[in-house]
Image (cartoon, rainbow, N blue to C red):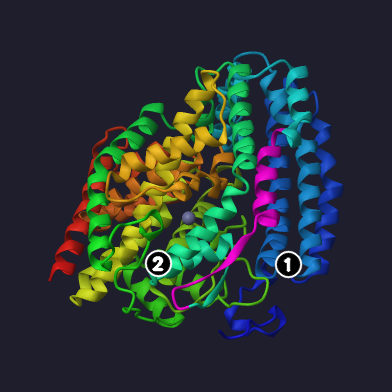
């Protein structure tokens, strides 16, 4: 393996240009200090919302302006830390930003609290009479929706003062996972020794082509998890019990209703997604598991074999420039403006693709308001890279459009829509390659990439959602959540899904320990909503062309002015009916059909 370079030694053209955020760390620091001094200016409006709509509008504008400045300041620190987390200056900048964020939140906390204490109907009256409030309408109405669930001002203050304590299950879990948990090195069948960690297991060992590497890595990984089985069960149980108590205190009908509130989607969509996908997808995924076992010539398929590559010798390397052209070709259907935006992102140093010591693993897109999206990825010439880049450009295109068309307060839609534009670009990329390529190995490789996306979102994430469903049900009924309960539930869910095609061992039963998602409300199911919508949308664009693209671009540009299902409706997808869910599962089935035929040939 080539030695990784220090950040200072990497070629500039392979890095992002952060000068567009701040020309220098000195400028950044000056702005941070100026913002810190400015944040108290909003206190002028304390106790004055009842005096008239203009006060409220001015205050909300002032808060928005402070938030825009904070986003710029925090993004600069965050991106620099992501490009090299070993740099102590970057670490201390992150700490300064976190502290400023906490002070800023404290300075503006009175705003929501005082709006919620205004007499019934007054905010609605203000909205009707004061045009300057129009930009804040969506957020104000969202806020008012939580009013029936507010406690007395004293109780709210008390809960707010316990904020850090209430966040401790996630904090303890994450800290232990990043700093304490250890995985022993292991050897493969040939006696070669490998190190093991969360990162290297998930990014490499788990999908290794050598069965002895996968299975030995799995033993080491499972033993590492086992040492923390009871600790993580306790953090998980505390998080669950916290949410159960908060939902009760706030007078929600159930914990699920409480946790779904910020997502703005109906409970029956959540239920449909869970039930339909598990029931209808399982037979297809079992076929895929049997195909994997046959193709790899294994006596049985263990849980650690379900991501084994089926055609490991086929590795079409692809350089960054060629990948950019391929992505641009696949997005041509989105129209010239969208493509021009993507081309700018790819060529004007919005993307950081170099590898260096201390660079954050994985990929993400950050879209600071008033600037432009930035994408982090580590380029290794793989097809997986191409799909990941297309995915992050989907986020960039979405927030780029929303930024152009909306005020900051209206740029972000609810969580269930957020992954639709990104996965949509993966779908367009796959459609484009499949439409052009008759090479059976290339087709297989692309289909397996796409199936990887469905596996991640429809299987891994949704079975997490299923576990949440059971665990919250048990906690609400007063049952205690222990390691053995969690292991048992997880094992039963996996066995129910995979049937007799995959052997579920103790390691598989502990896989709930891998995910920080359980500390993020009902986050796990949201990806599957995005994937259902983007599967439907990619089909509409393929069948209808420009009219469908036009609707999709409108939905992207609408940002957060509409709720997730309204955005999908605008694009022409009716997520209130189960149709798109059935269709998405059937599409996965058709991909597995082609793979079965391809490997039988
Ligand atoms: Zn994403």
Residue hosting label 1: 22
In front of the other: 330 or 126 = 330
Q: CA distance from mark 1 to mark 2?
A: 30 Å
The 10 Å Cα crowd at callout 1, few under 14, some 14 to 19, many 20 or more, is some
Residue 565 placement: quadrant: top left
In front of the other: 408 or 158 = 158
Residue 32 seen? yes
- Percent position (x, y) of residue 44? 83, 33
Mark seen at residue 387: 2
Callout 1–callout 2 Cβ contact below 8 Å = no
- On the rendered structure, is 464 left or right of 424? right
- On the rendered structure, is 477 left or right of 272? right
Say which residue appears at 52% left-offset and 35% top-offset: 484
Residue 525 seen? no
- Percent position (x, y) of residue 441? 24, 75
On whether ligand 1 comes within 8 Å of the CB at mark 1, the answer is no
Secondary structure state at the residue bearing disc 1? loop
Q: Quadrant of the N terminus?
A: bottom right
**N-term mark: 1 or 2:** 1
Question: What span is in magenta?
Answer: 166-190
Say which residue appears at 65% left-offset and 55% top-offset: 181
């Amino acid at each position: 393996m080539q030695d990784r370079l220090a950040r200072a030694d990497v070629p500039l053209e392979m890095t992002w240009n952060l000068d567009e955020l701040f020309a220098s760390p000195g400028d950044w620091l000056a702005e941070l200090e100026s913002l810190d001094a400015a944040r108290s200016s909003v206190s002028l409006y304390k106790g004055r919302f009842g005096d008239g709509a203009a006060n409220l509008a001015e205050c909300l504008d002032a808060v928005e302006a402070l938030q825009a400045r904070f986003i710029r300041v925090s993004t600069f620190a965050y991106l620099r830390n992501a490009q090299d987390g070993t740099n102590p200056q970057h670490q201390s900048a992150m700490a300064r930003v976190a502290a400023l964020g906490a002070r800023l939140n404290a300075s503006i906390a009175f705003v929501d609290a005082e709006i919620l204490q205004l007499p019934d109907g007054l905010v609605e009256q203000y909205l009707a009479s004061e045009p300057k409030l129009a930009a804040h309408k969506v957020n104000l109405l969202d806020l008012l929706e939580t009013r029936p669930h507010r406690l007395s001002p004293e109780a709210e203050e008390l809960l707010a003062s316990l904020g850090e304590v209430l966040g401790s299950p996630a904090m303890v879990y994450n800290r232990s996972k990043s700093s304490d948990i250890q995985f022993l090195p292991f050897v493969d069948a040939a006696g070669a020794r490998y190190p093991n960690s969360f990162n290297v297991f998930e990014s490499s060992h788990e999908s290794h082509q050598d069965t002895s590497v996968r299975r030995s890595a799995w033993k080491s990984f499972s033993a590492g998890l086992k040492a923390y089985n009871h600790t993580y069960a306790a953090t998980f149980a505390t998080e669950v019990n916290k949410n159960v108590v908060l939902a009760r205190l706030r007078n929600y009908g159930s914990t699920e209703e409480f946790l779904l509130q910020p997502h703005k989607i109906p409970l029956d969509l959540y239920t449909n997604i869970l039930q339909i996908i598990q029931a209808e997808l399982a037979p297809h995924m079992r076929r895929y598991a049997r195909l994997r076992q046959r193709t790899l010539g294994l006596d049985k398929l263990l849980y650690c074999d379900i991501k084994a590559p089926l055609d490991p010798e086929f590795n079409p390397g692809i350089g960054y420039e060629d990948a950019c052209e391929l992505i641009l070709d696949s997005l041509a259907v989105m129209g010239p403006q969208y493509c021009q935006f993507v081309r700018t992102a790819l060529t004007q140093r919005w993307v950081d693709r170099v590898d260096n010591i201390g660079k954050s693993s994985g990929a993400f897109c950050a879209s600071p308001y008033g600037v432009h999206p930035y994408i982090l990825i580590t380029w290794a010439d793989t097809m997986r890279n191409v799909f990941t880049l297309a995915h992050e450009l989907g986020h960039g295109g979405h927030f780029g459009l929303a930024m152009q068309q909306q005020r900051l307060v209206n740029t972000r839609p609810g969580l269930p829509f957020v992954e639709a534009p990104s996965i949509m670009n993966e779908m367009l990329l796959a459609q484009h390659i499949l439409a052009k390529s008759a090479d059976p190995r290339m087709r297989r490789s692309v289909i397996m990439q796409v199936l990887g996306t469905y596996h991640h979102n429809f299987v891994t994430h949704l079975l997490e959602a299923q576990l949440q469903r059971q665990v919250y049900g048990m906690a609400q009924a007063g049952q205690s959540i222990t390691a053995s309960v969690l292991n048992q539930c997880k094992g039963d869910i996996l066995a129910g899904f995979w049937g007799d095609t995959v052997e579920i061992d103790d390691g598989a039963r502990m896989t709930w320990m891998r995910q920080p998602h359980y500390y993020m409300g009902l986050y796990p199911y949201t990806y599957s909503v995005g994937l259902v919508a983007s599967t439907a949308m990619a089909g509409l664009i393929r069948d209808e062309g420009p009219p469908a693209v036009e609707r999709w671009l409108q939905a992207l540009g609408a940002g957060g002015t509409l709720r997730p299902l309204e955005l999908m409706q605008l694009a022409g997808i009716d997520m209130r009916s189960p149709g798109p869910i059935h269709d998405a599962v059937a599409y996965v089935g058709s991909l597995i059909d082609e793979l079965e035929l391809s490997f039988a040939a």
